[in-house]
Amino acid sequence: MALKVDDTYMDAGSQLIAGAVQENGGPPEGVLIRVEDLCKAYEMGAVQVQALCGVSFDIQRGEYVAIMGPSGSGKSTLMNLIGCLDTPTRGRYWLNGQLVSELTDDDLAYIRNKEIGFVFQTFNLLARASALHNVELPLIYNGTPAAERLERAQEALRRVDLADRMHHKPSELSGGQRQRVAIARALVNNPSLLLADEPTGNLDTTTGEEIMNLFDRLQAAGNTIVLVTHEHDIAARARRIIHIRDGKVAQDEQTR
């Protein structure tokens, strides 16, 4: 399945991605993510540390999945691979029909910008920029015209109930509002995947509940969400939990 590409800023590498078709036994139409025997090892001096090995699963379009595990389990490594922030030592990974585990760094950067919206625990907002400008950033990077950037960023902020805070800087917003800005920024490119890493980790219980309610709404609207967490109550909000332990899938359960 080809990726959606805006011809106005598609370079040669992007054309290669856009023209790709399912290959090598790739996933069927309804599968957004397929990881197959995924492994990742790191060199620590003379020692090789196996952070992840033999991980396989599919995630359907529109699913709400939590990846859960204790510190050192390999869940962060798996998140980096799913987010195209790293490449596997062995195994294959398809995202939106594309075998991304074999792409170059430049093509992976293109995939990250077009296909994945990231939400981090620390928000990662520019302190001196308004909420609106923070949300516009991914569109600036991919060359979207200014008028379209503005319209799409405003709409993304309306989706997270921040229409009245567009021109406020992060220091003028609460923690929950800052995370909503980060979610709007993740949504502005209409990504195939919303990937959230401990999204309530810096929030109090009440504000964290509000953010999780927002994820519920986004999933109900058709967004595919993968949530990485070590908190049982946060993982329980997903419809499915993949438990990672010692670099392997220990359990894969439907929660509702």
Image: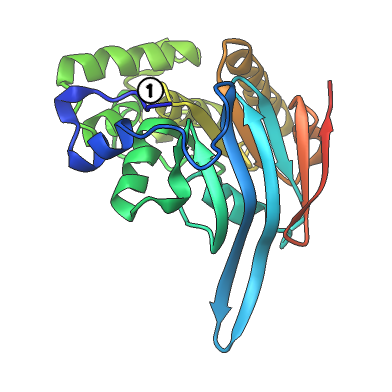
Residue located beneath label 1 in the image: 188
Residue positioned 66% across, 35% down in the render? 58
Quick check: can you spot residue 200? no
Q: Which of 173 and 9 is in front in this view?
A: 9
Please provide percent x and percent y for residue 183: 49, 27
**Image-based side of 141 in relation to 156, left or right:** left
Amino acid type shown at disc 1 = Val
Q: Residue 22 or 66: which is nearer the viewer?
A: 22
| Helix, strand or loop under label 1 | loop
Q: Which residue is drawn at 32% across and 37% down?
A: 17
Q: Which of 78 and 5 is in front in this view?
A: 5
Q: Quadrant of residue 121?
A: top right
Q: Can residue 73 be seen in this view?
A: yes
Q: Residue furthest front?
A: 24
The image quadrant that residue 143 belongs to is top left
Q: Give the image location of residue 161, x and y in percent.
A: 50, 12
**Front one among 240 and 205:** 240
Q: In this view, does 18 lie above or below 54?
A: above
State the colouring used for the structure image. Answer: rainbow
In the image, farthest residue toward the bottom: 46
Q: Is 29 placed left or right of 182 in the picture? A: right
191 left or right of 51 in image: left
Q: Quadrant of the N terminus?
A: top left
Number of numbered labels in the structure image? 1
Give the quarter of the figure containing the C terminus. Answer: top right
Question: Callout 1 environment at 10 Å: few (<14), some (14 to 19), or many (20+)?
Answer: many
Image height of 19 relative to 223, above or below: below
- Name the spot of residue 31 as percent of width and height, x first: 59, 27
Question: Could you tell me which residue is drawn at 77 percent across and 62 percent down?
Answer: 246
Residue 54: x %, y % from top left: 70, 57
